[in-house]
Image (spheres, rainbow, N blue to C red):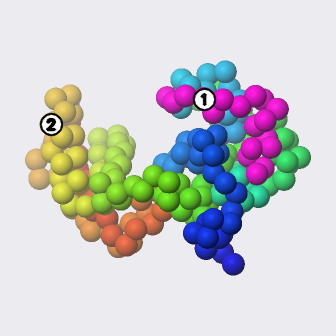
Amino acid sequence: MRASSLLRQGLVMRIDRRSFWFLDAVVELRENLAVLRSPDIEVILNRRTHGLEARELAPMLASLCEAGLIRVKHSETDALVRTLPEIESALAVSSCKPGRYSGFWYGLTPEGGAAWESLTRPDWNRYSTSSRRRREVCIQAGSREVAEAEFAWQSMEPSQVLVPGSEVWTVMRPWPATYWKTLPMGFQVRYRWAR
């Protein structure tokens, strides 16, 4: 039986406040394990800490792995770790020095995403992301209306003047909204800007 089926039946680990913190922290992007033990975790993640003692961290991650809610893998080799001893070793070799993150990262599995969704009930039609590369902006959203609103807001940035006629709209089928969540459709606009 798939973990998502088990989740619906309530047969997978109980997700308490502390477990939820680990799922919620990686909804949009995976995170380096070293961040979880960093004294600067609240600054790095811009959120309250998980509140666990150092000795509690590896068992928590191992239980989330065992439940199929998260996956821990090496950033370069894609080696997966899952057991308590493996996760303890992964924590020891991971680093989050500014500009030089290395080692193991964790992220949601589809089942972990489903568990997070069951608790938060997100409206994916209102979800949007944006990225900037050099002189181009890319906005993606779950609905045309949200994409248009984000475009209107971002293209008004005084320090980044929209190059007239540069916007290109695309309907994406399917749309990879996050690294773990794919939706049937999304909307994208790319445009160039100048100073």
To which residue does mark 2 refer? 156
Question: Quick check: 5 above or below 189?
Answer: below
The mark that comes first in sequence, 2 or 1, is 1
Residue type, label 1: Thr
Which label was assigned to residue 163? none
Write down the quadrant of residue 65 in the picture: bottom right
Write down the quadrant of residue 41 in the picture: top right
Q: Residue furthest right?
A: 85
What is the x, y in percent for residue 77?
A: 74, 54
**Mark 2 or 1: the one toward you:** 1
To which residue does mark 1 refer? 49
- What is the span of residues highlighted in magenta in the rendered image? 46-63
Residue 48 counted in the magenta span? yes
Of the 4 image quadrants, the one containing the N terminus is bottom right
Q: Which residue is found at the position 36% from the left and 45% from the top?
A: 131
What is the x, y in percent for residue 12?
A: 69, 62
Dot 1 falls on a residue whose secondary structure is: loop
Residue type, label 2: Met
Residue 50 counted in the magenta span? yes
Q: Residue furthest bottom?
A: 1
